[in-house]
Amino acid sequence: MSISRRSFLKAKGAILTLPFLHSIARAMDEPAKKTQPSKKLVMVYIPNGIVRRCFFPGEENGELPGFVGGFNADKTKNEVRTQNNPGIYPLELTSTMQPLSSLADDVTLVTGLDRTFKNGQDVHAQGASCYLTSMSPEQAERRGVRHPNGRSLDQVIGDKVGHSTVFNTLEISCNGFTAGKESIYFNNISWYGTDKIAPSIKDPKKLYDRLFLADSYRTHITDVTDLVLADAKTLSKKLAREDRETLGEFMEMIRDIEIRIAKMQKLIAGADVKIPTNEVLPRGDYIKLQADLMLLALQMGITNVCTFMIGPERWDASLLYEGVFPKPVQHHNMTHNQKGDGYKELQKIDIFHMKQYAYILSKMKTIKESDGSSLLDNSVVTYGAGLGDGATHQYFDLPMIVAGKSQGQIKQGRFVQCKSGTLNSNMWLTLAQLMGLEIDEFADSTGVVSDLWT
């Protein structure tokens, strides 16, 4: 197993898996030569679609759709599919994609993707729950299961590549609300199978405990780093200079995360009881904390496959987008009020989400792996939604960005236009093959997105 190359720091049930250290490899009489890291897959999901005119190249200066407004906003004058001109074009960063300007050589925009849809089911619930299952209504009927249930892509890939890690997959959510406002179908994208949810972790403390502790309840432990820092200091004396720096940075990241968790717990505890505590939790800080925990799990070999749900579909919940709006706002409600300049206010949330994605990619570029390459070099990191536009509830023209080199398999910095109507399951099949699966189909796929490959 690949984790045998790593060393551990332990104390009273706490365990930290260290990043790859060459000094330890030599001490274990392993070959000192650089080894190729494992491939990683991260799938970032954004809720309630996007303001498509600000996301897709060439649409921003076009005529505004005739939004009716309110919750009839999907009754528009221009409810038609865009017909793409398939091919590969230079990447054009639209206004919503501007946070990726320093990462333009690391990302590719893909358009023309649709997902299968079944009338009679809520569009938001279907958008989230079938996003990674992609089972068609016809397939569901043949198998005797309810559409859109099935085994999601991350679980299928985890079955193949998860044997060398602690967890086959890791499911993370940034929905801080403790009380459910909608059914599980609005709040999950990962599924073991029909009606078998792969539960995501939304509490940073619980995620931290799951990643780093054998005893997840942590009844007899205060801070993991307080217990293992002494061992780390002893180990550091035995390491080469470069490895000492790596270990120091790693331990600093762990300590920083613990401090941020404590800060958020204090913030919630001290909130005005008249205000729902979840509203005062700053979205950016919360998402970045969850992201950093995910990146540590990837760096430490705890998992190679992650789903990262930035928010739930539809929940009419007020959230604090710090630095964007002076007070909490309801994302879903805003998607149905885009008349006039309303879409410009909504776009601020799209840009906010894009900044979180840029944060993840930027951090992945700085994390070095065993062969000197970056975590991003060895990964595929997607960013997308189950709705093409939150105002129209459309399930076609889905937004999709693909980042990372997948160890040289993907050529980045491009704009790939698929033929209009290309199923998003074709993208999922492509990702599965990039991750090493030898399969010819996934769900209702009809082929791969070959233009992604180098």
Image: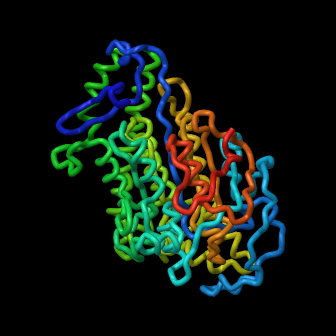
Closest to the observer, 454 or 185: 454
Closest to the observer, 407 or 23: 407
Residue visible at 50% across and 67% down in the picture: 130
What is the x, y in percent for residue 126?
51, 73
Closest to the observer, 438 or 20: 438
Please say if 16 is above or below 119. above
Q: Is residue 45 left or right of residue 62?
A: left
What is the x, y in percent for residue 257?
39, 44
Please say if 432 is above or below 276. above
Quarter the C terminus occupies: top right
Please say if 274 is above or below 202. below
What is the x, y in percent for residue 11?
20, 33
Chosen colour scheme = rainbow
Q: Quadrant of residue 446?
A: bottom right
Quarter the N terminus occupies: top left
Residue visible at 60% across and 67% down in the picture: 115
Q: Is residue 222 left or right of residue 271?
A: left
Residue visible at 40% across and 30% down in the picture: 19
Please say if 226 is above or below 234. below
Q: Quadrant of residue 398?
A: bottom right
